Amino acid sequence: MTKLIIQIPAYNEADHLPETIACLPRTIPGIDTVEYLVIDDGSSDGTSDVARKLGVHHIVRHRRNRGLAAAFRSGIEAALAAGADIVVNTDADNQYEGADIPALVQPILDGRADVVIGDRGVGNNAHFGPVKRLLQRLGSATVRRLSRVEVDDAVSGFRAMSREAAGRIYVTTEFSYTTEMLIQAGRKRMAVTSVPVRTNGPIRPSRLFSSIPQFIVNTGTTIMRAYAQYYALKVFAFIGALLGVIGAIPVLRFLYFYIDGQGDGHLQSLVLGVGLLVLGFLCVMLGILADLVSANRKLLEQLSNRVRRIEDDLKR
């Protein structure tokens, strides 16, 4: 039997949750069981009580607000513990059209994908302003290049994951899971695809960020951190090589004057160049150490996946 769990991170969404739940599918071809999971991220408006009255199958509640990424992590853990074969993540404010969930999970049912991203059509979405469209395009292009995953809407929160993929995703950021998850998926050679989905108009300002500059800074930081985490040697080797090239310039300048008999007046160039060369060397060494840590992390993730499989076998 195939079980689908639709997880909904929610923070003070008591007013909007009924409409969101009402739009979710009850049955889907190829799926035997459809269940709902609400992650109440420390709400103060009775979101958990509303979810319970609506008949939501699973409710996870944080004692205080921990952020979207933490709610996403809690949802994945709860969904896997509840025996989900496929996990769909959607928003509590009904931004995404629930009727598109069957199309979202179909590539997983067909065995064509591990992760499916709901593409909102950022280039021509009527609910996006010109600035947001531009930023979405630039951000998605950056994530595509860094993750080597072909997606046109990298920050879409409407996504589906197979059980295997969900168990291999370990989000560490505190801001948003969307971009880090794709960089991980690319690093772990998961099959990722997109399907077009519909969206509803915004009903309130975003709670994830208060301004466009804040969103750019937080998203950029998340992307760089995730990339450095999974491609540490490449990042530090590049920085080290750059420092080495810059450091070589003043050293060569000193050697030129030294050969010309004027070395005494250009010792500063030698000191600066050697300092930069040493920093470059240290960066490369740090990259090697970070790469070893990354390899150890990979082994721990594999061990965690094996333990989960053993637990699944014991439950059967």
Image (tube, rainbow, N blue to C red):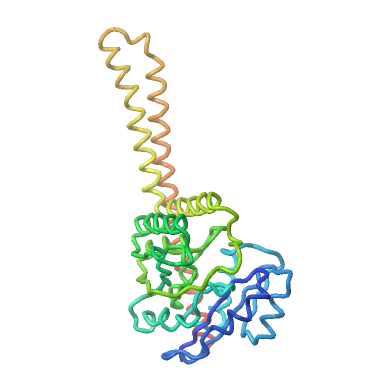
Residue 136 versus residue 156 in the image, above or below? above
Front one among 164 and 211: 211
Residue 38 versus residue 31 in the image, above or below? above
Residue at horizontal 39 percent and vertical 80 percent from the top: 108
Residue at horizontal 40 percent and vertical 81 percent from the top: 103
Residue 305: x %, y % from top left? 47, 72
Q: Dividing the picture into quarters, in which one does residue 74 lie? A: bottom right
Residue 269: x %, y % from top left? 38, 18
Number of numbered tags placed on the structure image? 0
Residue 202: x %, y % from top left? 55, 68
Left or right: where 140 falls relative to 259: right
Left or right: where 297 falls relative to 142: right
Residue 120 versus residue 255 in the image, above or below? below
Residue at horizontal 45 percent and vertical 80 percent from the top: 100
Residue 98 versus residue 173 in the image, above or below? below
